[in-house]
Amino acid sequence: EPEVTQTPSHQVTQMGQEVILRCVPISNHLYFYWYRQILGQKVEFLVSFYNNEISEKSEIFDDQFSVERPDGSNFTLKIRSTKLEDSAMYFCASALGRQNQPQHFGDGTRLSIL
Amino acid sequence: DAKTTQPNSMESNEEEPVHLPCNHSTISGTDYIHWYRQLPSQGPEYVIHGLTSNVNNRMASLAIAEDRKSSTLILHRATLRDAAVYYCILRDIEANNLFFGTGTRLTVIP
């Protein structure tokens, strides 16, 4: 069964540095998402992406964050000037369509900011 | 998105059925009921969804009350691999994203 894959599985970064989290969605999917989960807390929506542009974003997704689909397979989340509170699990998801299509999640990247 | 209420935790014996309840008294007519689960150290995983009628798939069954104010996810025969946090999520037909609550942590006892 096709899977969403995320790399790296664990990223350790100094505060203030930039980090790029990578995702390979399922190949025929058209909708892409990033969520995050701070340790012990809920899974939170960050951003959705369709047709090479952001379709929706949450309040968390401020100017520090950006997303890109640089080629036909990868979907990336860039976090600039990382802060301690950016430490979390970041999950990528993809879906075939929008309306009531299941979202398929990767196993996440654990981001640790020191 | 409308709010759902789930018990914080439940236990089940292995190989027995499990009924995970969810209350959603403020559900609107265009809200679908989605269930996801999150196994330890993994991302969320889609389980099942429905609107009004009961639904079955290879993973589980979803029983929806006639007034749609509550639903129950049924695992017919719990295995150790079913130990996870189960999330009941209301998702409007036009909604793009998912809003996760705190879910129900299911422990399966061997």
Image (cartoon, grey):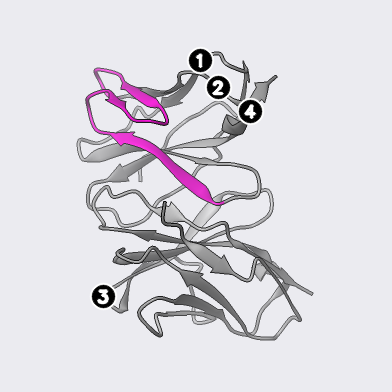
Q: CA distance from mark 4 to mark 2?
A: 7 Å
Instruction: Determine whether label 2 and label 1 are within 8 Å by CB.
Output: yes
Magenta residues span B43-68
Crowding near the residue tagged with mark 4, few <14, some 14–19, many ≥20 C-alpha atoms within 10 Å = some
- Numbered tag placed on residue B80 in the rendering: 4
Q: Chain of mark 2?
A: B
Question: Taking B96 as reference, is A59 above or below it?
Answer: below
Residue drawn 38% across the image and 61% down it: A94
Q: In the image, residue A67 lies at what x, y percent?
A: 44, 78
In the picture of the structure, the residue carrying the numbered disc 2 is: B78
Question: Taking B23 as reference, is B13 above or below it?
Answer: above
| Disc 3 element | loop
Q: Chain of mark 3?
A: A
Taking the magenta stretch, the answer to whether it contains residue B55 is yes
Q: CA distance from mark 2 to mark 1?
A: 6 Å
In the picture of the structure, the residue carrying the numbered disc 3 is: A51
Q: How many marks?
A: 4
Q: Chain of mark 4?
A: B
In the picture of the structure, the residue carrying the numbered disc 1 is: B17
Q: Chain of mark 1?
A: B
**Given the image, on which type of amino acid does mark 1 rest?**
Pro
User: Which of label 2 and label 3 is nearer to you?
Assistant: 2
Quarter of the rendering containing residue A83: bottom right
Taking the magenta stretch, the answer to whether it contains residue B32 is no
Q: In the image, residue B105 lies at what x, y percent?
A: 61, 32
Q: Earlier in the sequence, mark 1 or mark 4?
A: 1
Residue drawn 57% across the image and 49% down it: A42
Residue drawn 43% across the image and 49% down it: B99
Q: CA distance from mark 3 to mark 1?
A: 43 Å
Q: In the image, residue A104 lies at what x, y percent?
A: 42, 53
Q: Are marks 2 and 1 on the same chain?
A: yes
Q: Are marks 3 and 1 on the same chain?
A: no
